[in-house]
Amino acid sequence: MSSLDMLWLILCAALVFLMQAGFLCLESGLTRSKNSINVAIKNLADFCLTTIVFWAIGFSLMFGDTVSGWYGTGLVLTDFSVESADTAVFFLFQVMFCGAAVTIISGVVAERLKFTAYLIVALFVSAIVYPVAGHWSWASFGGGEGEGFLASMGFVDFAGSSVVHSVGGWSGLALLMVVGPRIGKFGGSGPIRASNLPLATLGVLFLFIGWLGFNGGSTLVMDESVPLILVNTIIGGSVGALAAGGLGYAVHNNLNVTQFMNGALGGLVAITANCFAVSTPIAALIGLVGGMIVVFAEDLLEKFHLDDAVGAIPVHLAAGIWGTLATGLYGNLEVLGTGLSRSEQISVQALGVLTYAVWSFGVSYALFWLVNRVFGLRVSAEHEIAGLNISEHGVENEDAVQNRGSYSPFAGE
């Protein structure tokens, strides 16, 4: 790896790290202020924990020498002082992806989990669920011997519509089904309102910026493919926002701010798998469908009384599935370089979607169900109503203090 390539990857790692701040702002803004401190510290704590766990074991499982294409070995507790600079830079970039996959789960089940329980969830996902899933598609990227079994079949997921986003979404859905909805979400006296939509919007802008590193850095080199990747990323996200916002406006005759924001993220997630292999008009089409899928998926969750606090499942899971399939539908076969026909590429992309669903949801559900039976994932009803700031951390923000005595579990306080 040249010095220019290393510099590019370090810059992109920093941009992906900025996404952690984006998740923090988005999640804090879309939830109630009585839980804002809890939300913020979770986004810092899960990054710190997953960094150590990924260094200790996840990096090895994901990028070590393959065992029959299923998982890697040989990089446990890697000492980067004796490894090449290339390996250190590659780890720096990849650990940011691990943090992003785990943080998706935080937003799904915000406002109801014990802080220690969430850290246990983050540990399991960063140690087992994410790195094993990643090995199947990206094992050969780290220089280890062999490739994952999905990659060997021709599966393509350039920057992680499935590997990062759908894996995080499936794990979040599993956890959501174990812990259930927030008190008052369904059948209450009113909606649970967001506390700070401008802050949430700032979070989306941070994520938008970070996505340039997310997709652009996935080349692992600075070459002529990077400009197209960055342009397609921006186009996909922008069209996704307009599509979701326009669809909501057509139905309700007003702009749903949350849907507009999540539509942008849905477009970004959808273009992530294929941004290097599609034309810009096709990138716009993929973003368009990605944004609209977010709206339909949100309605589906409501129908089944699944309480995703920030809309992370529609964004990361639903749009991630679409982006993975769109790679087979629209990707330039020569650029994909798998040697498969169009129908064969579509089939292997669908197989990848199914494989990640079975693994990420199945293993996560089993682990979370067991932890819930043994440890208990959810705070008590009394603590949930009081707010996780005070019940989990013993502190309150100024808004909560001023509003004490006029509390409604449905208000955006």
Image (cartoon, rainbow, N blue to C red):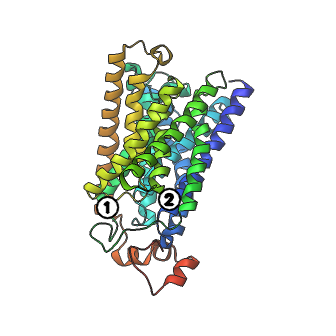
Is the C-beta separation of discs 2 and 1 under 8 Å? no
Q: In the displayed image of the protein, which residue is found farthest to the right?
A: 3
- The image shows residue 95 at horizontal and vertical percentages of 56, 42
What residue is drawn where x is 42% and y is 39%? 290
What residue is drawn where x is 50% and y is 59%? 27
Look at the picture and state if 283 lies above or below 313: above
Residue 15 seen in this snapshot: yes
| Residue topped by disc 1 | 179
**Pointer 2 local density, CA inside 10 Å: few below 14, some 14–19, many at least 20:** many
In depth, the one of 9 and 58 nearer the eye is: 9
What residue is drawn where x is 47% and y is 69%? 32
Look at the picture and state if 312 lies above or below 237: below
- The image shows residue 407 at horizontal and vertical percentages of 43, 81
**Pointer 1 local density, CA inside 10 Å: few below 14, some 14–19, many at least 20:** some
* First in residue order: circle 2 vs circle 1: 2
For badge 2, the amino acid type reads: Glu
What residue is drawn where x is 50% and y is 68%? 195
For badge 1, the amino acid type reads: Val
Secondary structure, mark 2, is helix
Residue 27, label in figure: 2
Look at the picture and state if 98 lies above or below 405: above
User: Gap in Å between the C-alphas at discs 2 and 1?
Assistant: 18 Å
In depth, the one of 168 and 87 nearer the eye is: 168
- The image shows residue 326 at horizontal and vertical percentages of 40, 28
- The image shows residue 256 at horizontal and vertical percentages of 44, 56
